[in-house]
Image (cartoon, helix red, strand yellow):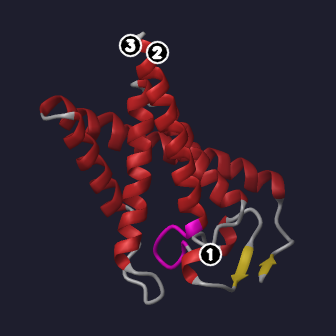
Amino acid sequence: VWQYETSILLFPAVLYSIVFCLETGIIEEFIFRGFLLNFFKHRYSVFVGVLVSSTVFALLHFSGFHKNFPWYLSILSSAAAGLLFAQAYLLFNNLYLPIGLHAGWHLAMRMLGSTGLDVNESILMVTVTDGPVAFVSTKEGGAGIFELAGLVTVSLILFALREFKRLKAQS
């Protein structure tokens, strides 16, 4: 069951969401991929850079302990997002793609009325969701399965692009 608040002023909400999501994507990607990943990549290895940046990203995005969502899934879902953004960065060796993916992720959550947002922050104003918490809830502490399905899909596309780029360079 999904219930929406119909009294939203659409243009200001969309404009605010775009600015907020771009700002968040830019700032976080400069910190996690631009600084952390690069620092550890150059000092140790790509693997260490990806591991450290994704782990710190996950720990700083941990939503806390909630009775309905296991804490370890909250960290795991954020780490998976960090790995996706790191993969996007490494694909083209610049921050444009991870910034776009990060901002797009936040914007999609806002536009689709993610339950992880407060009611006054989501465009479609989802106020009530009923169903298994693992399917519908980011508010309970982690990405729902639908968000994770999107993350896996984009990861597979990026992996295929990276392999195509590698094979093209070999020939």
Give the residue pinned by disc 1.
136
Most common SS among magenta residues: loop
Marks 2 and 1 close (CB-CB < 8 Å): no
How far apart marks 1 and 3 lie (CA) works out to 44 Å
Q: Residue at x 56, y 38 (%)?
A: 100
1 left or right of 84? right
Give the residue pinned by disc 3.
170
Q: Residue at x 46, y 21 (%)?
A: 165
How far apart marks 2 and 1 lie (CA) works out to 40 Å
The N terminus sits in image quarter: bottom right
Disc 3 residue type? Gln
The C terminus sits in image quarter: top left
137 left or right of 58? right
Q: Is residue 95 visible?
A: yes
Residue 85 drawn at (x, y percent): 43, 43
Marks 1 and 3 close (CB-CB < 8 Å): no
Membership of 140 in magenta stretch: yes
The 10 Å Cα crowd at callout 1, few under 14, some 14 to 19, many 20 or more, is some
**In the rendered image, which quarter is residue 3 located in?**
bottom right
Disc 2 residue type? Lys
Membership of 75 in magenta stretch: no
Question: What segment carries the magenta color?
Answer: 138-145
Q: Earlier in the sequence, mark 1 or mark 3?
A: 1
Residue 118 drawn at (x, y percent): 61, 73
Residue 40 drawn at (x, y percent): 19, 37
Give the residue pinned by disc 2.
168
Disc 1 residue type? Val
Q: Residue at x 60, y 69 (%)?
A: 117
Residue 79 drawn at (x, y percent): 36, 57
Q: SS for tag 1?
A: helix
